[in-house]
Amino acid sequence: MTTAVDRDALRTTQRVGDRVFSTATIVAGSLILAVLAAVAIFLFVQSIPAFLAVPEDFDPGVSNFWAYVWPLAFGTLWSALLALIMAIPVAIGIALFISHYAPRKVSQGLGYIIDLLAAVPSVVFGLWGIGVLAPMLQPFYSTLVEWFGWFPLFAGPVSGTGRTIFTVAIVLAVMVLPIITAISREVFLQTPVLHEEAALALGATRWEMITMAVLPFGRAGIISAAMLGLGRALGETMAVAMVLSPSPQVIFQLLTSQNPTTIAANIALNFPEAHGVGVNILLATGLILFVITLAVNMLARYIINRRKAFSGAN
Amino acid sequence: MNFKQYGRPAVIAIAAALALSSCAANEGAAPDKAASDLSGTINAGGASSQQAAQEAWTAAFQTTNPDVTINYDPSGSGAGREAFISGGSDFAGSDSFLKDEELAGEFATCAPDAKAVDLPVYISPIAVIFNVEGVTDLNLDAATLAKIFKGDITTWNDPAIAALNKDAKLPSTPITAVHRSDDSGTTKNFADYLGQNAPDVWTEKAEDPFPYKTGEGAQGTSGVVDAVTNGVGTIGYADASRAGDLGVAKIKVGDKFVGYTADAAAAVVNDSPLVEGRDASDLAIALDRKTTDATHYPLVLVSYAIVCTEYADADKAALVKEYVGYMAGAEGQAEAAKSAGAAPLSTELQDKVAAVLKTVK
């Protein structure tokens, strides 16, 4: 605890450097808030005409903005969810391998390679998706629909090109993998060695040690890693726009030609030729994406804060 | 990072980049004609279908007129017309001619009371491309094509397709019909063709977005070509110049099946009447999609340059006249055919455009 006297003493010893630096940090800190506010205000003001738009401004069959944005919002969340379901187990596996299983040399090399994956631009992933992944998966999809078509998610008719939401989810999973892996690995490495050794001393195998000491300690970290990954998956534009065969409806089937598209990809596809109220409608969908991302992040914060008390850290 | 190790190659790379970028593509050829006295800047924008052609035209025109700068912004037909009407550009490129309500309004670029006219400058045949194992030739009529893209016909061995292709061995593969997922004048023209020739099947109005929620979407012409190439049992539509090695379907005109050629595309544009009720100088074409003449290929996209009959600024008028005249002239059309795969305007139509441009002030 600092007494009043101490604080005075501190104030008198402030030098120019202190003042410049503290001002600089305050400016930097408020700048980010100002930028965020500017973006939010811009989106909101530009969106107002879209909320008031008449049915003629929309594609045939859509009567108002909410009917227009709902399938897009669904597609955004659906594709990101599928991607996370695929990416999280793999990412945790890689992170555990690097932190607890692999020999030091291998783990370092693997760490670099994972980071390298994060540096690949999304356009390249998009090209890979349409050029390699989709044609490669198409025969597999055909077989899947043929044998497991009775399962609602795999119902046909199968897409002839493989450019489905499932392919998109795989591409997205590959894209979010490095983020989730890198953060999980850092968190796992932070596990107190005493906890690990205690577990081992009690006769735990390595797997039991991980489930008892490492994973509980890292749970909050894994969740925040997943949420950062989710953030990237929600906002990913180029790869989705290039790979997906979009159709603005709510569809759960994974392997057909009609797939719910995402907000970001829809903006990228339609902005170049948009004019008049069309531009406002697209910007308004951007506002919705902004709100969704904000909500997801707040939810993640809430989960992390709630779980913190129960993690192995204390 | 070890600077010494990377520094040298980096310096060389930067130097090379600077050296290379200092000679732009449009300065490549030395001007072979006497330099003109034209100077100034043309700002234009609109249809992205014209983009490749506009780039070639700009490069060639700036070579012969070194003091002229031309900026063409491929922002889309609607945006191009909007910018032109509000005075933001000197002419507009557009896949559709001016609407009646647009013509009724004011044009900020033009002199007071002067109107704008549509001049055809770019014709592109649209090819129906397909990728079906064991099928090299495919004949389709408009109704069948419409049903395929609407999702009413779902397999390649459907009786409707078989009836038109007696000799082909059609597999039982499902059809994946690929359309443009972005808004496009190509879609609008394709839909217009189907809507006029098969009105019972294709009931939606022809607009830039694809009207039905069936089939598969792909981004841009290259996306469609890519999806058709890499897919199984696929069919799509794209600018003919991009069809490459893919199978191209023949469409039914009268009682014959016609494949696309530049001549057939130019012929249908040439023989189609002008839109009625407009000024004689407005060359908006009411494309005869229902033609029965087998020398015609009615599945074409016509793109216009929209210019003022009288400009507020006389210098601009001179520049635009010269440039659009070049675009629609024999030289410009040959250039567009070479670099963008367009079908050249017939000489008759070239002369008509030139005659209109003469009256532009």
Image (cartoon, coloured by chain):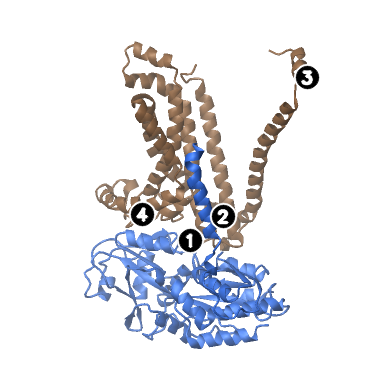
Chain colours: A brown, B blue
Counting other residues with Cα less than 10 Å from the Cα at mark 3, is it few (<14), some (14-19), or many (20 or more)? few
Is B153 located above or below residue A123 in the figure?
below
| Helix, strand or loop under label 1 | loop
* Left/right of residue A242 with respect to residue A151 in the rendered view: right
Counting other residues with Cα less than 10 Å from the Cα at mark 1, is it few (<14), some (14-19), or many (20 or more)? many
The tag earlier along the polypeptide, 4 or 2, is 4
Query: Which residue is the site of mark 3?
Result: A12
Query: Which residue is the site of mark 2?
Result: A282
Query: Callout 1, which amino acid?
Result: Asp
Q: Position of residue A115 (x, y in %)?
A: 44, 37
Q: Residue at x 48, y 27 (%)?
A: A220
Residue under disc 2 on the same chain as residue under disc 3 = yes
Query: Callout 4, which amino acid?
Result: Gly
Label 1 to label 3: alpha-carbon separation: 65 Å
Query: Callout 3, which amino acid?
Result: Thr
Residue B233 versus residue A197: which sits nearer the camera?
A197
Q: Residue at x 47, y 82 (%)?
A: B269
Q: Position of residue A236 (x, y in %)?
A: 48, 47
Query: Which residue is the site of mark 1?
Result: B182
Query: Callout 2, which amino acid?
Result: Leu
Label 3 to label 4: alpha-carbon separation: 66 Å
* Left/right of residue B19 with respect to residue B86 in the rendered view: left
Label 2 to label 1: alpha-carbon separation: 13 Å
Pointers 4 and 2 in contact (C-beta within 8 Å): no
Query: Which residue is the site of mark 4?
Result: A131
Q: Chain of mark 3?
A: A
Label 2 to label 3: alpha-carbon separation: 55 Å
